[in-house]
Image: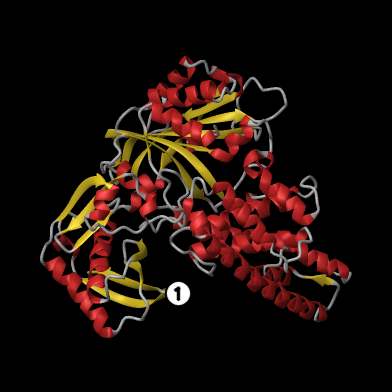
Amino acid sequence: MNLKDLYIDFFVRKGHKQIPSAPVVPENDPSVLFNTAGMQPLIPYLMGEQHPYGTRLVDVQKCIRTNDLENIGDTYHHTFFEMLGNWSLGDYFKEESINYSFEFLTKVLNIPIEKLGVTIFKGNDLIPKDEETKKIWLSLGIKEERIKETEIDNFWIAGETGPCGPDTEIFYFRSDEEIPEYFDPEDTRWVEIWNNVFMQYKKDETGIHELPKKNVDTGMGVERVVAILEGVNDNYESSIWKSTIKLLEQITGLSYYGNERSMRIIADHIRTAVFISADPTGIKPSNTDQGYILRRLIRGAIRHAKNLNIDNNTDWEQLLAKNIINEYKKYYKELEENEQVVLDVLKNEKIKFNRTLEKGLKEFEKIINNLKDNKLDKDNAFKLYDTYGFPIELTEELAHEKNISVDKEGFKEKFKAHQELSRKGSEEKFKGGLASRGEQETKYHTATHLLNAALKQVVGDYVHQKGSNITTERMRFDFSCDHKLTEEEKQKVEDLVNKWIKEDLKVTKEEMDKETALKSGAECMFIERYPDIVTVYSIGNVSKELCGGPHVTHTSVLGTFKIIKEEASSSGVRRIKAILN
């Protein structure tokens, strides 16, 4: 039995219900480009909604994180990873949570206690030290010198306000060296493997208050723990990556050892690209949001393929993608269902990027022909990187052939400044989460249901939701449609939504099994993301959808609905942007 199956089986025996993994692209959460943790799809339930599966949950969630993309190529960072998680929604709290984690690690996985270290919340002016967690760890046999108190790293909050609380992180000493007596989380030989978050407070404008209903949210990365169990200090030497790395060695005719960084990056980026392009939301490479990340990953893999002398006219990326699909299709059926989509995305982007590389080579020739001395300056080196996707190593290699030096230090400065700008933008994009489920977002979320129903009446029953994005200022709704809406159609849709708002229709909520919900006519966007027991929201007699919320209780609070734009999103998909006044 592998780690994922062991984990699910353990927590099911502890009274937890398994829930399916949500898609990698979150539904109705504009604060993030991708689901970055197992808790994200559970936000409505962590905020107080009743989960149809009860108060104890467990799952394996597909996650994508791009905030440390520059670290990919080391032994343990990945853009796509699987997160094992267990939750208590107002059920058990610190003692049971820590005991479950400790039992699973030491009894099920047989990890020696000597190799474990933990961090706890040190306390600050507002919140006291988490003495309870410390006592629990001590009672389980974790020595005092293996417990480290920190402030910043051991307090969790999703945004500026909302549920928050201390957490305890579990570390494993991943090294063949002698285990030090004292645990130091800054020592890179100690690798974090599990995080237990105790949501016991709520932060608002007036301060921090105790929550009457406390939740536990935990997460453990599959890749890191598998590497630990298999006794390797490099994740890419574990069974998770074995077949992909072996295939890369066959394609290149090179050994992994000596070419680790490029092979890790290719393996990581192609795996993530497979999961993004197989996602039911239909992401394609582009210059914005998820599409930009997908493009960047594929192009990064192609650049490193060039480092390994892979012929880009061969189908190397198709071979790797098929291998990854075969490895994961048992758990994620969308990979098999959308295999051709994935292969087409990779092939088409490779063809486009090959053309860009050719243009970049011409630009390089133009730059060096205009050089006044034998040095390529930082601005031109960065232009080749930013506009044409040339890594600095490729620019140096080309320049070396012409006996020209490159201002590498200057390039690094420009690159660092560029990274800082990207990171700030990313932080803005990622700072939402639990705090982004406010009153206005709730109104917009309910309005998407009315818009979906109106489009079905005006355009046709074949219309189905393909995606949505909500902020406090507006809603964006993607739907299947084979034509641009006429002015008359747009007006009819708008009038119909406003009519239903004025009628003050009641919004009701029911729980039922998935099959009954579908037979009753309930609409849903991605059937595979829902568990066997689902929540169905009805708005009067006009709309009935499977949904995780949040919703208003009656429609008159929505105000006035106004369509501000209707445009193409992708082939066969249209997009409406609308506001509520």
Q: Is residue 74 visible?
A: no
In front: 570, or 299?
570
Q: Is residue 99 visible?
A: yes
Q: Amino acid at mark 1?
A: Ser
Q: Is residue 324 above or below residue 54?
A: below
Residue 175 screen position, x and y as percent: 69, 29
In front: 363, or 21?
21
In the image, is 389 to the left or to the right of 475?
right
Q: Quadrant of the N terminus?
A: top right
Residue 195 screen position, x and y as percent: 48, 34
Residue 544 screen position, x and y as percent: 22, 58
Q: Quadrant of the C terminus?
A: bottom left
Q: Which residue is mark 1?
A: 571
- Residue at 31%, 39% in the rendered image: 202
- Residue at 48%, 16% in the rendered image: 140
Specify the farthest residue to the bottom. 487
